[in-house]
Image: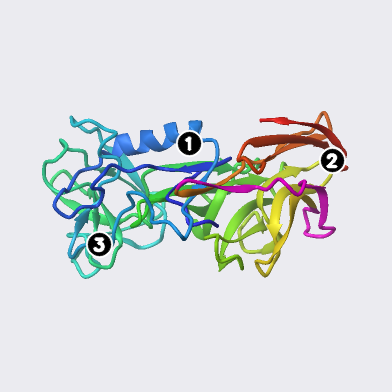
């Protein structure tokens, strides 16, 4: 996974530009929770591809290291005007999650929650009182919630969800939930949770790229996971991305292939994806690859011409081309790449790898 300054999207992602002075200790600001949630949904419907900060450049307007004590998270201050903020709910994901009196792990516990519980995220006028999102001295992010009419407390955002995406199995149960969680560096982390038996069981499966893909029969799902292992190329700040298959209950997981942007053709029992590094992070000829859903028969479908690649540097960012588009009825798939000038090219090929069309995208 690249070192991205932004939100990962179901089909793509792009960095969120923060205002000048973002994270300045003398300029606390409040994030209206309903506005933050609306912002994420609107951005995800529009973004085209993801941008990642190259190691040779400083991250533009990213949140600097925490400056002692609690630091108000200045996310999106320039986007939302002041005014009355309407509250939304924080959905508890973990088991035995504590609501504490202050945003510190050592603070007194007000209440112990259960998975599936919801608590109102308090909305107030911008700039009044404490921020809705607060960092503690360890860098953990907390959100303020209402426990009763008289009691308020704080809960860690890695254990609750204010903004999320849901993907339900065709069987109705289980449910896959992607928690869209703000992080200390100003990014939006996508964390995959599995919910079973009407919230009687929940399990965090880890950071995810894009969206999980359920099999039509609901017996398994596929998703792109971050290995947290860097690629060998020192000029590119990326980690190796794994395409994995999980059983419906999340207890069994297996590696299908190394690559990104998987799409599934259930009729053929195949997964198509981009690949430009191997299991060790070494570069391989980039192209569209296919593998059986059980992880066997890895093969190239279409290798990019030498002048094309999936990544390009764009100012302060590395940019990845958009994901492939599968056309099942036409037995074709379209992939995108960049040429040497940085222009985007679309290749349409048959599922056997025959080039049908090449044109500017």
Mark 3 — residue?
Answer: 66
Task: Indicate the quadrant where residue 256 lies.
Answer: bottom right
> Going 77% across and 59% down the picture, which residue do you hit?
295
Mark 2 — residue?
Answer: 351
User: Who is closer to the viewer here, 56 or 65?
Assistant: 56
Q: CA distance from mark 1 to mark 2?
A: 29 Å
Residue 217 visible somewhere in the drawing = no
Examine the structure image and report whether residue 305 is included in the region drawn in magenta. yes
Q: CA distance from mark 2 to mark 3?
A: 50 Å
Residues rendered magenta in the picture: 291-315
Q: In the displayed structure, does residue 216 sit left or right of residue 122?
A: right
Q: Position of residue 356 (x, y in %)?
A: 84, 32
Mark 1 — residue?
Answer: 44
Secondary element at tag 3: loop
Q: Position of residue 318 (x, y in %)?
A: 52, 50
Instruction: State the quadrant of the N terminus.
Output: bottom right
Residue 181 visible somewhere in the drawing = yes
> Is tag 1's residue or tag 3's residue first in the polypeptide sequence?
1
């Amino acid at each position: 996974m690249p070192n991205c300054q932004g939100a990962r999207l179901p089909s793509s992602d792009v960095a969120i530009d923060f205002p000048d002075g973002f994270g300045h200790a003398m300029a606390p600001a409040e994030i209206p929770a309903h506005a933050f949630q609306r912002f994420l949904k609107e951005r995800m419907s529009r973004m085209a591809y993801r941008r990642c900060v190259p190691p040779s450049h400083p991250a533009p307007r990213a949140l600097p290291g925490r400056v002692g004590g609690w630091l108000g998270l200045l996310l999106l201050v320039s986007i939302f005007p002041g005014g009355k903020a309407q509250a939304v709910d924080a959905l508890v994901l973990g088991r035995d999650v504590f609501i504490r009196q202050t945003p510190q792990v050592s603070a007194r516990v007000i209440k112990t929650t259960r998975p599936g519980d919801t608590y109102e995220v308090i909305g107030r006028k911008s700039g009044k009182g404490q921020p809705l999102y607060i960092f503690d001295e360890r860098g953990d992010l907390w959100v303020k919630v209402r426990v009763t009419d008289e009691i308020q407390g704080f809960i860690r955002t890695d254990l609750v969800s204010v903004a999320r995406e849901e993907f339900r199995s065709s069987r109705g149960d289980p449910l896959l939930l992607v928690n869209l969680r703000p992080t200390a560096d100003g990014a939006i982390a996508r964390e995959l949770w599995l919910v079973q038996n009407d919230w009687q069981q929940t399990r965090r499966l880890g950071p995810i790229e894009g969206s999980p893909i359920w099999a039509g029969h609901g017996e398994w799902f596929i998703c792109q996971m971050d290995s947290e292992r860097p690629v060998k190329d020192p000029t590119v700040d990326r980690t190796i991305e794994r395409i994995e298959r999980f059983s419906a209950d999340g207890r069994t997981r297996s590696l299908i292939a190394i690559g990104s942007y998987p799409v599934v053709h259930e009729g053929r029992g195949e997964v198509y994806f981009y690949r430009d590094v191997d299991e060790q992070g070494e570069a391989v000829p980039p192209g569209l690859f296919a593998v059986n859903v059980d992880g066997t028969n890895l093969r190239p479908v279409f290798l990019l011409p030498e002048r094309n690649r999936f990544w390009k540097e764009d100012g302060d960012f590395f940019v990845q081309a958009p994901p492939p588009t599968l056309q099942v009825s036409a037995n074709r798939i379209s992939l995108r790449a960049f040429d040497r000038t940085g222009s985007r090219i679309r290749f349409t090929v048959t599922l056997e790898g025959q080039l049908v069309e090449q044109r500017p995208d």
